[in-house]
Image (tube, rainbow, N blue to C red):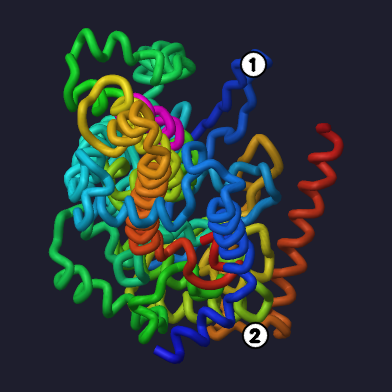
């Protein structure tokens, strides 16, 4: 325990600014300089958040003790839309990057759809899928699909031709080239796309939940706004940020495991 | 019939943008017997790599045919091994997995591939580095992996495209010496492309000196000096003087043509 404290003390420069801001915020709220209706004190936010999670004093009213359910609902939507985007983005990206005729046939259409903000699909998503999980999943898919697709295409197009020659010499057919050379070689780019995509995925779940869904963290946020519960609004914001951070951490750790070879060794060897 | 045969090879590179054709190789006949170590020697642009790429199957002759062991070459394949100028190893695979890459494509189990790779890893003296990644190896070690990979595919036919050109002088000498040992041990037939006169004379049983573009064979020189070859001996220097003279004549002709 004492080593934890000394660790924290060693890192004090990192914490100085956020701790100071929190204390200032708390102080200004307590002396009444910040009206609680506009910006509730941090202690209040954390107490309400605690009740939302554990349900001990009903200060979060309707949603007291229901945080886990909300977080799970949002996470499920992110997971569903993001997985779909990952599978489709990588498959299509590899096809577009590898086969000239696929690129010619479908890339222009995709590039035309790409600049349309995913949010502007909300009206159509609601009439197509109704008010439930599906419009949110659709939006998450749209938002994370394009970064994954674009990065996969880039990764496939920049595969070292000499590696393909070496594999062809070892007797690889086209399917084997894709599986044993192109896909692993494009992995660093694919992961760059996956990491950008997961950020947009959370952004769009929350947006969809504000408009088209009746559960989840985004819904709680918007609902609390109607009841002027800014402590819950802030607690929702922190929750979303935290979950987004954790999912990125998860993807990063998978990436570091799979791409360990990228960090292997010397400058000389990096050309090999 | 020879082991490797190139019959009436002509290669024309088409340049669709300029609409001009460039004759790169002008009617070359070359036969390589089993267990020979043939060095193709010539200035850059003489078509020596193109010739090797035809034996590998990466390039098709405009006319003429390439046969290895009586079989017409139509594309790259694991019945020949090739060592490239760069090691061209899969950076995500450990040494043993790179060496046995051809067996991965055949769907062999990890255990079988490791067992098959081991003797070749030992042949290129990389014991203890089986599980290293290419990024952790020096240039010379990476090129050894490349050689082991080619040997595993087929030690009988090894094609080498300036494999030691990027190595430092000392490593180059060591590798040349080891290549001779490996060639003798596996009774390989090797076609070795180089632009270094010394390298060709240290390694080759035959040195094929090529002309400037369009590539033809200027002269084929059989070398029966004792091994290991002494690069300061009179015999070595006599041949070297002759080869350098051929190359000088070619470069004068090239300037006249230009």
Q: Quadrant of the N terminus of chain A?
A: bottom left
**Viewer-nearest residue: B247 or A135:** A135
Please identify the dominant SS of the magenta region.
Answer: helix
Q: State the residue position of label 1.
A: B17
**Residue A96: image x %, image y %?**
38, 26
Residue depicted at x 41% and y 35%: A200
Residue depicted at x 65% and y 81%: B170
Query: Can residue A153 be seen at all in this image of the molecule?
Result: yes
**Residue A141: image x %, image y %?**
30, 28
**Viewer-nearest residue: A75 or A216:** A216
Q: Report whether A238 appears left or right of A19.
A: left
Q: Report whether A220 appears left or right of A128.
A: right
**The disc numbered 1 marks a residue on which chain?**
B
Above/below status of B120 relative to A49: below
Q: Is residue B43 magenta?
A: no
Residue depicted at x 38% and y 47%: A235
Above/below status of B78 relative to A148: below
Q: State the residue position of label 2.
A: B230
Query: Can residue A194 be seen at all in this image of the molecule?
Result: no
Above/below status of A104 relative to B240: above
Q: Is residue A144 magenta?
A: yes
Quote the CA–CA distance across marks 2 and 1.
50 Å
Q: Secondary structure at mark 2?
A: loop
Residue depicted at x 30% and y 41%: A178
The quarter of the picture where residue B232 lies is bottom right
Q: Residues within 10 Å of mark 1 (few under 14, many from 20)?
A: few
Magenta region: A141-153
């Amino acid at each position: 325990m004492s080593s934890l404290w000394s660790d924290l003390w060693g890192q004090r420069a990192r914490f100085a600014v956020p701790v100071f801001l929190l204390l200032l915020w708390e102080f200004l709220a307590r002396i009444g300089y910040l009206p609680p209706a506009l910006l509730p004190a941090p202690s209040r936010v954390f107490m309400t958040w605690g009740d939302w999670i554990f349900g001990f004093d009903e200060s979060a009213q309707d949603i007291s003790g229901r945080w886990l359910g909300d977080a799970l609902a949002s996470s499920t939507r992110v997971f569903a839309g993001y997985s779909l985007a990952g599978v489709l983005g990588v498959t299509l990206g590899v096809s577009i990057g590898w086969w000239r005729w696929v690129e010619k046939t479908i890339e222009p259409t995709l590039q035309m759809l790409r600049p349309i903000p995913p949010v502007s699909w909300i009206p159509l998503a609601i009439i197509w899928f109704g008010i439930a999980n599906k419009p949110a999943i659709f939006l998450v898919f749209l938002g994370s699909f394009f970064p994954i697709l674009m990065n996969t295409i880039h990764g496939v197009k920049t595969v070292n031709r000499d590696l393909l020659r070496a594999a062809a010499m070892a007797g690889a057919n086209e399917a084997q080239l894709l599986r044993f050379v192109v896909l692993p070689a494009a992995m660093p780019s694919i992961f760059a796309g996956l990491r950008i995509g997961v950020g947009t995925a959370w952004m769009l779940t929350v947006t969809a939940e504000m408009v088209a869904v009746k559960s989840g963290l985004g819904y709680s946020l918007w609902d609390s706004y109607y009841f002027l519960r800014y402590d819950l609004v802030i607690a929702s914001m922190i929750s979303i940020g935290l979950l987004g951070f954790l999912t990125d951490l998860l993807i990063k750790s998978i990436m570091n495991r799979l791409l360990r070879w990228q960090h292997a060794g010397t400058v000389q060897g990096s050309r090999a | 019939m020879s082991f490797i045969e190139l019959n009436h090879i002509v290669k024309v590179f088409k340049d669709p943008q300029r609409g001009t054709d460039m004759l790169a190789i002008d009617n070359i006949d070359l036969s390589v017997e089993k267990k020979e170590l043939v060095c193709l020697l010539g200035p850059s642009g003489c078509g020596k790599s193109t010739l090797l790429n035809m034996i590998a199957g990466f390039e098709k002759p405009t006319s003429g045919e390439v046969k290895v062991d009586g079989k017409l070459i139509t594309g790259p394949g694991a019945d020949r091994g090739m060592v490239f100028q760069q090691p061209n190893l899969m950076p995500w695979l450990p040494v043993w997995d790179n060496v046995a890459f051809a067996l991965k494509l055949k769907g062999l189990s990890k255990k079988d591939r490791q067992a098959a790779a081991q003797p070749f890893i030992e042949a290129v003296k990389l014991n203890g580095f089986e599980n290293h990644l290419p990024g952790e190896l020096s240039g010379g070690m990476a090129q050894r992996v490349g050689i082991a990979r080619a040997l595993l595919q087929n030690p009988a036919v090894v094609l080498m495209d300036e494999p030691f050109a990027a190595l430092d002088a000392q490593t180059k000498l060591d590798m040349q010496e080891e290549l001779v040992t490996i060639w003798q041990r596996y009774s390989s037939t090797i076609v070795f492309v180089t632009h270094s006169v010394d390298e060709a004379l240290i390694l080759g049983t035959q040195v094929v000196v090529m002309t400037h573009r369009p590539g033809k064979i200027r002269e084929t020189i059989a070398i029966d000096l004792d091994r290991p070859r002494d690069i300061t001996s009179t015999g070595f220097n006599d041949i070297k003087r002759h080869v350098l003279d051929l190359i000088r004549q070619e470069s004068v002709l090239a300037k006249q043509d230009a």
